Amino acid sequence: MAGFDKASRVFIAGHRGLVGSAIHRALIAAGHRNIITRTRAELDLCDGAAVDEFFTAEKPEYVFLAAAKVGGIQANNTQPAAFIHDNLAIQINVIDAAWRHDAEKLLFLGSSCIYPKLAPQPIREEYLLTGELEPTNEAYAIAKIAGLKMCEAYRRQHGFNAIAVMPTNIYGPGDNFDLETGHVLPALIRKAHEAKVSGAAEMAVWGTGNPRREFLHVDDLADATLFCMSRYDDSIALNVGVGDDVTIRELVETVCDVVGFQGALAFDTSKPDGTPRKWLDVGRLAALGWRAKIGLRDGIASTYEWYLEQGGALAAE
Ligand code: GFB
């Protein structure tokens, strides 16, 4: 077997999502010639029989499992059944089919929210399952933990080369700018832009502004996933982050500066803060030779540019 190279048959599950589309761009940029994709209309990953048929026909050698039901704090908090159901179904169908149809390797994407709510900071990989989860995203976290454990179990029982990475909060082109279901960074870009355009005196920010979050540009994450697909073959799910975090207040100040909104900030404390902090220890991946390259301010500026290119608020529809 030649290993993961430009001729490998690579399936990106979820190639239209934020992460999957970045992996798609990165694979094309790296010269991959055999990339297999399916839209949701072509292949429903929650449908086990359809997934099996797809693997029988296409026999992918390398699988990036980037398909997931994701959302911000509000979506997670209000749709727990959909988050646990869809994520478990996708994971069971894709991981199992990849193993049964003799894929060489699968990369699964976890998330930093699967660590305990009050984990010591920065969060090391071994803190997984050492405490209570954050209630606002418990259903999503349980599904993602099951995915990691499935990779571990298939490696142990079947010798299947399934690896996992745990990205911190991701943002970038292709993000969801919907104010109800999206994450904080795209929501703040949209709010600051709309406040500037309408001449509003203030913009609303959820929670107290005190929680701390770490933000990783999705192109950095895609680069890390290609790096791991080429060079990492172990059962420990690797943290992927930038090694640095900011408060939500600091984040919104940078966003307002980039966008050019100079009005006031109105913190709405009827909205949840979520986990107080989730700052990843990225020492393991750094020791293997990978580091994030895109700074937060530059990443926000290019994401804002992308948002404007999509027609501003229309990008959210
Ligand atoms: O990004 P976010 O929705 O999710 O919110 P989490 C992060 C923080 O930003 C919270 C605050 O403290 C929010 O209250 N925030 C301030 C806002 N203004 C806004 C706003 O306009 N919109 C949003 N969405 N937040 C998610 C998990 O947690 O992180 C998911 O629910 C997932 O499971 C994701 O893992 C990475 O960082 O709190």
Image: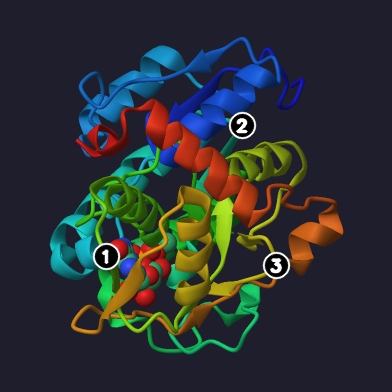
The number of callouts visible is: 3
SS state under label 1:
loop
**Are there few (<14), some (14-19), or many (20+) residues within 10 Å of tag 3?**
some
Image quadrant holding the N terminus, namely: top right
**Are there few (<14), some (14-19), or many (20+) residues within 10 Å of tag 1?**
few
Residue 120 image offset from top left, x and y in percent: 59, 89
Q: Quadrant of residue 188?
A: bottom left
Q: Could you tell me which residue is drawn at 47 percent across and 29 percent down?
A: 12
Of the numbered discs 3 and 2, the one sitting upstream in the chain is: 2
Q: Quadrant of residue 4?
A: top right
Q: Could you tell me which residue is drawn at 32 percent across and 44 percent down?
A: 176
Residue 233 image offset from top left, x and y in percent: 71, 48
Name the mark on residue 104: 2
Q: Which residue is mark 1?
A: 201
Query: Which of labels 1 and 2 is toward the front?
Result: 1
State whether residue 184 is above or below residue 208. Answer: above
Q: Is residue 286 left or right of residue 61?
A: right
Image quadrant holding the C terminus, namely: top left
Near-viewer residue (19 or 110): 19
State whether residue 192 is above or below residue 65. Answer: below
Query: Which of labels 1 and 3 is toward the front?
Result: 1
Residue 8 image offset from top left, x and y in percent: 64, 18
Q: Which residue is mark 3?
A: 243
